[in-house]
Amino acid sequence: MKFKLSALAAATALSLAPMSHAGEVEVLHWWTSGGEAASVQFLKQQLESKGVTWTDFAVAGGGGESAMTVLKSRAISGNPPTAAQIKGPSIQEWGDLGFLASINDVATQANWDNVLPTVVSDVMKHNGEYVAAPVNVHRVNWLWANPEVFRKAGATIPTTWDDFMVQAGKLKAAGYIPLAHGGQAWQDATVFEAVVLGVGGAEYYQKAFVEGDMDMLNSDTTVKVFDVFGQLRQFIDANSPGRDWNVATSMVINGEAGMQIMGDWAKGEFKVAGKNAGTDFVCVAAPGTSGSFTFNVDSFAFFSQSDADKSEAQGVMADAILSTEFQEVFNLNKGSIPARLGMDRSAFDSCAHDSMDAFVASSQTGGLVPSFAHGMAVSEAVAGAIYDTATNYFNSTDSAETGAQQLVAAISAAQ
Ligand code: GAL
């Protein structure tokens, strides 16, 4: 009896051992819509199954501006979370300030250099060491459409901006809201970005909006971009100011509106509503952008910890994020495609397949460009200048020439 008891105690201790040492993570993110919440829930479950306790630090607000403000105040007060959704050049900024922890041991062990495309892995490193783990690749230049609305209005889904104006006019005449839109600066910038790419092409986009080339910004193409962007004012509804992006998506889902221009996190909302790609909703590249891909890679950066258990938990989290199971399930929920290369595509839908193909094809033609509306391309100061100009212009009756001049002035002041 004595033996039996101690054997049981030993077995119990063994089975609890990994649990008691795996620590806890407090994770900052802004994923609160239906599809986003389902995605983050899976990460939480994965960690809890490995004995890591999850403390949720969600700060609502699409695009993450509010989350970043809260993160800064926590970090400045000396109390950053264990991990935070930080993307693109911001990872370097946080690294330069000395906040981030290396997860290079985990990354080397799991061979991240070989399982990630360099366009992704480069961004995850600071001074040559991994400090962040990528969960996905979102394509931003998408147009989501309700095919039934188009059918009823006798319209066809547009693939050029000229045709967009014609088809949107038909939707409007038939009593539908042509473009579901939320009037928030980041959503204005997301639509503006699609227009920049569709009107100017990838080379113009890269030179003007990533490299800040003043000759390109001062060209007639910029005036044309503002002209097309301004024409969209007539196709949104009067209730758009302040509307959240997922509410705009629901207007396409329920047939109140015909289209939305939004990154493929919108697909997560269609999925939560039980809708299927190709039949209930259609995804096509935003007008004029079929050969291009504005990428937006979500990632978790890890903050330096003094507690060894918390550091260990960061390693467990980083390792879980790059697992094939996580990359598949998370991205099925989120609407994005895996960051990890060589994944089985069979569980993914036609929109994801299009995105995977476009990612590879555009990387060979120069059409793969970072999203400035989603923190992947430029410093926060320059992104802020673009946001302000786009949103002020969209909410005014200014001419295209004025919009273009204001953009040039704002970018040169911020650079
Ligand atoms: C993006 C983010 C996406 C999505 C979207 C709306 O910036 O990368 O993951 O959540 O905001 O909140």
Image (cartoon, rainbow, N blue to C red):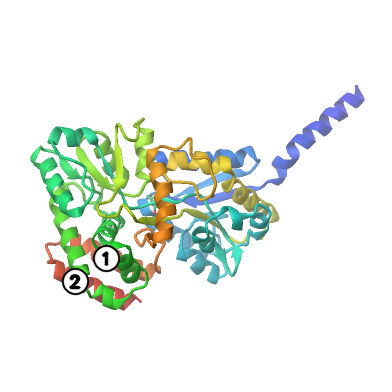
Count residues near mark 1 (Cα–Cα under 10 Å), then give few for <14, some for 14-19, many for 20+.
some
Which residue is disc 2 drawn over?
A: 220
Which residue is disc 1 drawn over?
A: 388
Looking at the rendered structure, the kind of residue marked 2 is Asp
Percent of width and height locating residue 227: 15, 62
Looking at the rendered structure, the kind of residue marked 1 is Asp
In the rendered structure, the answer to whether residue 198 lies left or right of residue 316 reads left
Residue 38 appears in which quarter of the rendering? top left
Measure the C-alpha gap from mark 2 to mark 1.
21 Å
Percent of width and height locating residue 114: 60, 55
| Mark 2: secondary structure | helix
- Which residue sits at x=29%, y=63%? 387
- Which residue sits at x=68%, y=58%? 105
- Which residue sits at x=64%, y=60%? 104
Count residues near mark 2 (Cα–Cα under 10 Å), then give few for <14, some for 14-19, many for 20+.
few
For marks 2 and 1, give the one nearer the viewer.
2
In the rendered structure, the answer to whether residue 207 lies left or right of residue 112 reads left
Residue in front for this viewpoint, 360 or 102: 360
> Is any part of residue 390 visible from this angle?
yes
